[in-house]
Image (spheres, rainbow, N blue to C red):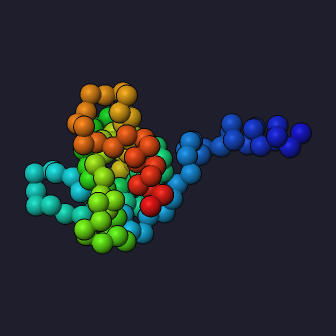
Amino acid sequence: MRSLKAWLKKLFSRERRRAKRIPSVSLVAHYWDGAAPVSHVVRDISSIGLYLLTEQQWYLGTMIRMTLQRSDLPEEDKRRSIQVLVKVVRAGDDGVGCAFVPMDNRTGSSRDADAMTLNKFLKG
């Protein structure tokens, strides 16, 4: 009976996230928008997406190539940054929610991270 209650609660919940979010204290994103390079704080991240604090308000569906960089590792550490392709899936007052675009769903740069590399990066 308990599992039925849990299932019903999940069914009627407004929460639609499919993966656990990890608050980010040491992760920033860099992307090119035509202006001088600036670091943007990643509020939280999961294996399927991230929430980026930014004043940019992209249209839903916009694809953005960005570099995620960890500030908790030394500059010379090769594991410090990773390049990903994301798709804007929601907009908030303080930023945008983005989903990672899997390698098998696109023809992307060979420099972009696949799911295994991304998970390894997140685990640190």
> Can the viewer see residue 51 in this picture?
yes
Q: Compare residues 105 and 5 and report the one nearer the observer.
A: 105
Q: Residue at 46% across / 49% down in the picture? A: 119
**In the image: residue 99, left or right of residue 20:** left
Q: Residue at 48% across / 58% down in the picture? A: 123
Q: Position of residue 88 (x, y in %)?
A: 34, 41
Q: Compare residues 31 and 104 and report the one nearer the observer.
A: 104
Q: Residue at 56% across / 42% down in the picture? A: 18
Going by the picture, which residue comes out furthest to the front?
77
Which quadrant of the view contains residue 115?
top left
**In the image: residue 95, left or right of residue 56:** right
Q: Position of residue 39 (x, y in %)?
A: 24, 64
Q: Position of residue 8 (x, y in %)?
A: 75, 38
Which quadrant of the view contains residue 24?
bottom left
Q: Compare residues 92 and 46 and report the one nearer the observer.
A: 46
**In the image: residue 68, left or right of residue 4:** left
Quadrant position of the C terminus in the picture? bottom left
Quadrant position of the N terminus in the picture? top right
> Can the viewer see residue 41 in this picture?
no
